Amino acid sequence: MTGRADRADARHTAWLDPVLLLLPAAVVAAGFLSIYVARRYAMPLGYDTGKYVWRANLVAARGLDGLSSVPILHPNADRPGFPILAGLVHGTLGITPLRLSFLVVGVVPAVIGLAAGALAVTAFEQPRWSFPVYAVVVGGSVNVSIMAVSHLDTLLVSGVVLAAAAAVLDAADGRRTAAAAVILLVGGALVHWNFVAVFGAVVAVFGLALLPESARARRAGTRTLATPTGRVGTILVAAGALGVAALAGLTPAGVQPPPPSRSMFLDRLRGVLPSYRLPFVVPVALGGAALLREGSARRRRSLWFALLWCASALAAAALLYAGLPVAAHRIVGFALALPFLAAAALVGVAGRAWRTGRAPIRAVGTAVLVLGVAVGAFVTLRDWYDNAPSMSAKAFGYATTAGAYLDRYAPGRPVVLLFETTPGGVVVGVRTFRAAAPPDRIAQVGAYLGDVTELLAGRPTIRPGDAAFNAASLGTWRAVRPVLARDPVILTNPAFDTAFPALLAQHPDWLVAPGLMVVSGPRPAGIQAAAIPGPISGWFLLLGGLAVLALLGAAGVGWAWSLVPSGWFERCALAPAFGVATLVLGGAVADAAGVRLAGPVAWLVVAGVALAGWGPAVLRRRRRAPQVRPAAAGSAEG
């Protein structure tokens, strides 16, 4: 009778499952994307966004090998994940890399939230009703908002890593999820290998922590590789070997360690730490950890993993302060186990209150849960709304005009951009130009910081008493000096040249279009200026976000179904993360075969990845199908 009652109750509540799955994803995505509607921004957020856009445009035109052709400003050729996804999205949905940059800050946090919810329900054995809490608290955390505005590759890999965490913990518990973990981690390595390596270090320490349990299992007769440590170690070895092979064979430059800059990392860590509100979040997270201790061995094992992941942030900060150039500010944000444990505290309090059966206590528990989620969302959105695009719409319009001019009147000639701005403005300006320029111009652009007279005289601009400017000016001069010998076109525009008005007054004949002066090069008359981009449409954010999330889910659902031994709910929650990893892998393999990820080819790659994911499930079902024996001779009628 009990079994029948449970099944009947499950049928009555089954209609809620799609709501539990989709509603938190929509809430997280809408929260982040709402800034574009409220502030009417015409350009996407993020200091590095221009770089992501031009990398994607270059890969679409020349393949991944094009990244190794860029001489200045690190092209991150060892992180092909975003350019590959951008190419596939453009080829299938028609969304350009620039417009995709608007969407990723909403879609990818939704992917992170879904993976966090699945991790809670599977590895931490949390009730189904808690799924939206984990999805909103983790996907809408300050950690995610900081990554969304500063580090898109880290944001993109985070959802993949959370899904991999669920697979690793399932494998440690004896489930057949090792293949899922390996595929996710190898795909993640092509997105951002540095943070997959950080996650791998956490997994390695976790495997060592399981040694006592594994020793007991070994004494009981379990094979070494079948013990918890053996299963975790197998994942690490396989993912490490295949990840290194993928980076070496599918990227044009292999692994490229970031340049060490301890002083910069220290400044950034000190600057970002207050945003995490650690004096408030850490006690809540510790409360969540205490509540998770009560339960099965599986839950306690998963708790150890979460605590080790949090400890990675402490270890990174300690190494930085000890003198090593560790990007601790980014590893702190990557430690998503901290908001996860904070969500566990809210769920634990509400769950205990509800189990008392007393209405007043239930009301208090529910109020704590709702208030906790609301406060977290408020803090995140308040910080999020303090951000603004680093690329200006006017600068992008000017760069588009310059690109059209170069394409028509100076084909094949290199270009030097003149800057009279801050050193940081040079980086933003070059990224803006590359994002707007034709792909064949991306690798040909040089930048000069200083006075036009000094540039035409063939020397750097040195200003007494301004050490920062002089250092940056000398750096641009060294990079641009070889270009000057190749008869470049020299351009400037008012977005990044404060001397533009004075220069225009002295040389009005240099102006070839509104916002574009040609210091050296052809000066045709009547060039039409490109339109300045206007605010992004709310309808595009809604429909485009749904389309991209659906594409990721469709590509990954077969892999989740084949490789994750859970119910359809958990598999669907993990599907977008699988979609990110497998689309990046499939796109990298296609690129290595000489295929450009555009048009019908993009559809073929996406369809191939999606169908390949169903392969293991189909094969497994065929093996399990009962064999029909042929009828014995003479058994037929007559």
Image (tube, rainbow, N blue to C red):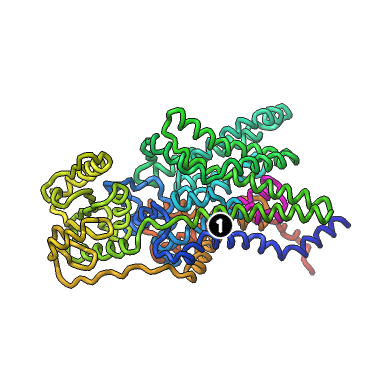
Task: State which region is magenta.
Answer: 116-135
Taking the spot 44% from the left edge, 49% from the top edge, the residue there is 151
Residue 411 x, y percent position in the rendering: 19, 61
Task: Please state which of residues 200 and 42 is positioned toward the viewer in this rendering.
Answer: 42
Are there few (<14), some (14-19), or many (20+) residues within 10 Å of tag 1?
Answer: many
Instruction: Kindly indicate the quadrant of the structure image that contains residue 597.
Output: bottom left
Q: Position of 521 compared to 9: left or right?
A: left
Furthest residue toward right: 1
Residue 170, percent from left and from top: 65, 44
Q: Is residue 225 left or right of residue 240?
A: right
Per the picture, the main secondary structure of the magenta-coloured stretch is: helix
Q: Position of residue 144 (x, y in %)?
A: 52, 50
- Is 444 situated left or right of 266 in this image? left
Q: In the figure, residue 175 lies in which quadrant?
A: top right
Q: Is residue 127 magenta?
A: yes
Q: What's the residue at 56%, 39% (across, down)?
A: 235
Residue 499 in sight in this render: yes
Q: Look at label 1 and name its amino acid.
A: Ala
| Residue shown at 28% from the left, 69% from the top | 530
Drawn side of residue 389 relative to residue 28, left or right: left
Residue at which label 1 appears: 110
